[in-house]
Image: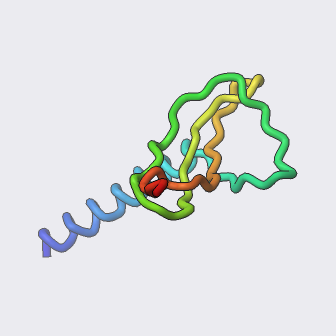
């Protein structure tokens, strides 16, 4: 009985921690040609995968107001040969 109570308490605590983490991570925004970007500082970018296909990548950036954004956009992979 005590073990099951301990397990239940741990699951409850972990769900609270996960809920706190999700509030600090901004939602992923999808890029379109109509998107108006306000990029003051690039924080990180995904590397372009070594595949021959169009793939999604992410850029994390800060706008001029200091707010952090995560932008998803598509790029051509770097794995295509030219001949």
Q: Nearer the viewer, residue 76 or 20?
A: 76
Where 19 falls versus 37 (above or below)?
Answer: below
Q: Is residue 40 above or below residue 14?
A: above
Q: Residue 17 in the image: x percent, y percent? A: 40, 50
Q: How many marks?
A: 0
* Residue drawn at x 62%, y 56% as measured from the top left: 74
* 24 to 19, vertically: above or below: above
How is the model colour-coded? rainbow
Q: Is residue 74 left or right of residue 3?
A: right
Q: State the image coordinates of residue 23 (x, y, percent, origin top left).
A: 57, 48
- Quarter of the rendering containing residue 76: bottom right
Q: Compared with residue 60, is residue 4 higher up or lower down, i.e. above or below?
A: below
Q: Nearer the viewer, residue 46 or 25?
A: 46
Query: What is the quadrant of the N terminus in the image?
Result: bottom left
Residue lying farthest front? 83
Drawn side of residue 6 relative to residue 17, left or right: left
Q: Residue at x 78, y 55 (%)?
A: 32
Residue at 52 percent of width and 51 percent of height: 22
Q: In the figure, is residue 67 to the left or right of 18?
A: right
Percent position of residue 5, x then y: 21, 69
In terms of depth relative to the viewer, which is nearer, 82 or 58? 82
Left or right of residue 63: residue 33: right
Residue 15: x %, y % from top left = 40, 60
């Amino acid at each position: 009985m005590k073990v099951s109570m301990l397990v239940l308490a741990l699951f409850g605590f972990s769900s609270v921690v996960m809920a706190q983490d999700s509030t600090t991570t901004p939602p992923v925004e999808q890029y379109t040609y109509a998107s108006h970007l306000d990029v003051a500082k690039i924080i990180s970018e995904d590397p372009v995968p070594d595949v021959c296909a169009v793939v999604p990548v992410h850029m994390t950036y800060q706008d001029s107001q200091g707010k952090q954004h995560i932008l998803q956009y598509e790029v051509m992979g770097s794995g295509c040969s030219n001949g």
